């Protein structure tokens, strides 16, 4: 594993999709309030274990294809997706339901770094990739790549002004367990 997180932990910022009629439940909610509600997650997704470990109510069943039907039917109160994917998921799936929306005042955060894994039999390649990442990080190229893909998304989702509910992620290596929300790194 190359221990240099990419994408500024954007995958760890989890944005809610909710029923329009439930907007009031989330507007001023804190962690305790949200724990009274139920999160819907497709079966086998690792997010379920993360939320359960943090004492959230979780309904884990079904598939990605039926999660929005289940939300609309009231089987649970909300679902979450990474900030990097929530807009496209909403556009391509959830928007088919007129009464769903992306919640705009809060988000969850847990450490979920995107890293490179190199075959252990290729140690020279690992050194080369790590050095290359260090170079493009130091010369600004990595920031330019990130901005070209995510600048508008970060602005559209208004990440800098959302309330953050931080969670522990027991599923990642110890070296990443202390990653904290860093909205300054997302600021453009």
Image: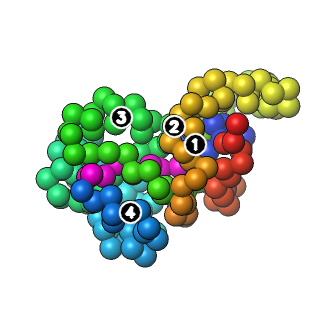
Query: Height in image: 67 above or below 31?
Result: above
Instruction: Kindly report the distance in space between the C-alpha atoms of the residues bearing marks 4 and 2.
Output: 19 Å
175 horizontally vs 13: left or right: right
In this view, the mark in front (3 or 2)? 2
- SS class, disc 3: helix
Residue 158 sits in which quadrant? top right
- Is most of the magenta stretch helix, strand or loop? strand
Foreground of the two, 99 or 91: 99
Instruction: Kindly report the distance in space between the C-alpha atoms of the residues bearing marks 3 and 4.
Output: 20 Å
Going from N to C along the chain, the mark reached first, 1 or 4, is 1
Instruction: Kindly report the distance in space between the C-alpha atoms of the residues bearing marks 2 and 1.
Output: 14 Å
In this view, the mark in front (2 or 1)? 2
Picture mark count: 4
Disc 3 designates what residue? 89
Foreground of the two, 101 or 41: 101
30 horizontally vs 42: left or right: right
Taking the view exactly as shown, the residue that stands out farthest to the left is 73
Q: Which residues are magenta?
A: 12-20
Could you tell me which residue is drawn at 61 percent across and 49 percent down? 160
Disc 4 designates what residue? 26
77 horizontally vs 110: left or right: left
Disc 1 designates what residue? 10
Disc 2 designates what residue? 156
- SS class, disc 2: helix
Q: Are marks 3 and 4 in contact (CB under 8 Å)?
A: no
Going from N to C along the chain, the mark reached first, 2 or 1, is 1
Q: Residues within 10 Å of mark 3 (few under 14, many from 20)?
A: some
């Amino acid at each position: 594993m190359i221990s240099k997180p990419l994408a500024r932990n954007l995958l760890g910022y989890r944005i809610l999709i909710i029923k329009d009629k439930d907007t009031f439940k989330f507007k001023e909610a804190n962690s305790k309030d949200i724990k009274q509600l139920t999160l819907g997650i497709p079966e086998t997704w690792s997010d379920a274990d993360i939320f359960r470990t943090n004492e959230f109510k979780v309904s884990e069943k079904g598939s990605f294809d039926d999660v929005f039907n289940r939300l609309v039917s009231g089987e649970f109160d909300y679902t979450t997706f990474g900030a990097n994917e929530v807009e496209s998921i909403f556009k391509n799936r959830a928007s088919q339901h007129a009464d769903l929306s992306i919640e705009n005042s809060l988000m969850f955060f847990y450490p979920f770094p995107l890293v490179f894994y190199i075959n252990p039999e290729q140690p020279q390649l690992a050194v080369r990739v790590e050095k290359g990442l260090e170079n493009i990080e130091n010369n600004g190229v990595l920031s330019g790549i990130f901005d070209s893909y995510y600048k508008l998304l970060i602005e559209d989702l208004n990440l800098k002004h959302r309330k953050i509910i931080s969670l522990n992620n027991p599923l990642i290596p110890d070296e990443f367990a202390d990653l904290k929300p860093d909205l300054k790194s997302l600021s453009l």
